[in-house]
Image: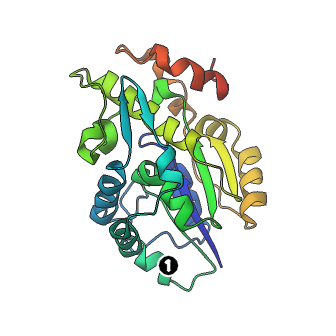
Amino acid sequence: MSLITVIGRGHSGTRAISHTLYASGVFMGQTLNPSGDKIPPEAMYNACRIMAKYVQWNGGLSWDFEPLHTMDIDPEFESLIRAYLADVLNDKSAHRGWKIPETTLIYPWIVRMFPDIHYIHWIRDPRDCIIGGHKTDDLRDFGIQYPVTDDIRRRRAISWLYQYQLMESTPKPERYILIRFEDFILKQEETLSRLEEFLGIPLARIVVRPGSVGRWKTDTGQHDFDFFREAMAENRYD
């Protein structure tokens, strides 16, 4: 049996891969919301708040994640995650998984708890990602400190950066693949072929909307921030 999870910030188009996995016969939990998130989410949210206690904010846009990779995992965290995933872990399906964007907030400890599962890293152009709102826009809701701002777009941008840096700081698991949302939409067949090889299962084809790519080009709000530059270059967003 295989276990799969999706790592990616909210509003990065992760519902597309969740719906694809579900349509392909992967058990994604007993109850899903329209975004393909496994719900109820409260145990996951509380687990996020526990791990956040061990993240040191250095001020500005700098956080120290290193202790997360070596310290003992908080037992309460493990208990909450196993409670949240109980239906997935106990299911007898050949292929099981889950998707909820908040998993990204606890990625270092998820990798340590489940080192052998398949990790799909999902990324989207941050200029598109911050146009819409998400539960993780205000990191303080999850106990994470950052430069306080009333500018909602800047708040979302900081959330994007924090989660990207957290993902980058985490040693890559053995079974790992990086997928750009844009490639899934504009090169669906090619991208699904990569995913099928990675997962070892055939995948369903879902309807995709090319108009969801490059929305920032017609957006009238602020969507570009200097601190996106390095990550955009690394992921071929010119």
Q: Nearer the viewer, residue 214 or 103?
A: 103
Please tell me which residue is depicted at 58% across the width and 26% down the height of the picture: 231
Residue 157 found in image quarter = top left
Which amino acid type corresponds to the residue marked 1 in the rendered image?
A: Leu
Please tell me which residue is depicted at 24% across the width and 25% down the height of the picture: 148
Quadrant (top left/top right/bottom left/bottom right) for the C terminus? top right
- The chosen color scheme is rainbow
How crowded pointer 1 is (Cα within 10 Å; few <14, some 14-19, many 20+) is rated as some
Give the percent coordinates (x, y) of residue 213: 55, 29
Q: How many marks?
A: 1
Q: Nearer the viewer, residue 88 or 82?
A: 82
Please tell me which residue is depicted at 30% across the width and 65% down the height of the picture: 43
Is 159 placed above or below 39 here?
Answer: above
Residue behind mark 1: 89
Q: Nearer the viewer, residue 71 or 162?
A: 71
Can residue 200 be seen in the rendering of this structure? yes
Give the percent coordinates (x, y) of residue 83: 36, 75
Q: Is residue 199 left or right of residue 44?
A: right
